[in-house]
Amino acid sequence: MSGISSIVFMDEEKYFIGKIPEENKKNYRNKIAPFKGELEIWYCQKQSVIVNFILISITILAVVKASSNLINYFFELPKHRLFNRG
């Protein structure tokens, strides 16, 4: 259905707007992909029925409300200076 990095990067396209394709590829490879990997490692370490239920619920709410910020109310995720929200 969804994954932790899919929720956090639900609006990932905003990091690519107005940039040249080569810069986008470099930013994805060097910044976004490694952080997505950190998020997936976090998930592997924390996974449980409750975490999965919360992630499914957040996914549904994020689609309806169009906000992925809900994740921060439920979990203490790895931090990144560019991608973490308040």
Image: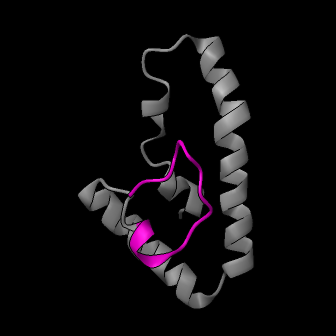
The stretch in magenta equals 71-86
Instruction: Write down the quadrant of residue 62 in the picture.
Output: bottom left
Q: In this view, does 74 lie to the left or right of 79?
A: left
In this view, the residue farthest toward the left is: 65
- Measured along the vertical axis of the image, is residue 79 above or below residue 56? above
Q: In this view, does 43 lie to the left or right of 74?
A: right
Residue 3 in view in this figure: no
In this view, the residue farthest toward the front is: 81
- Per the picture, the main secondary structure of the magenta-coloured stretch is loop
- Measured along the vertical axis of the image, is residue 14 above or below residue 76? above
Residue at position x 49%, y 52% from top?
84
Q: Is residue 2 left or right of residue 26?
A: left
Q: Is residue 51 left or right of residue 13?
A: right
Tell me the colour scheme of the image. Answer: one colour
Spot occupied by residue 26 in the image (x, y as percentages of width and height): 69, 23
Residue 33 magenta: no
Spot occupied by residue 21 in the image (x, y as percentages of width and height): 59, 13
- Measured along the vertical axis of the image, is residue 65 above or below residue 23? below
Residue 80 magenta: yes
The residue closer to the viewer here, 1 or 81, is 81
Instruction: Write down the quadrant of residue 44 in the picture.
Output: bottom right
Query: How many labels sit on residues?
Result: 0
Residue at position x 64%, y 27% from top?
27
The residue closer to the viewer here, 69 or 57, is 69
The quarter of the picture where the C terminus appears is bottom left
Spot occupied by residue 4 in the image (x, y as percentages of width and height): 57, 63
Residue at position x 72%, y 32% from top?
29
The residue closer to the viewer here, 23 or 64, is 23
Residue 7 in view in this figure: yes
Residue at position x 50%, y 48% from top?
9
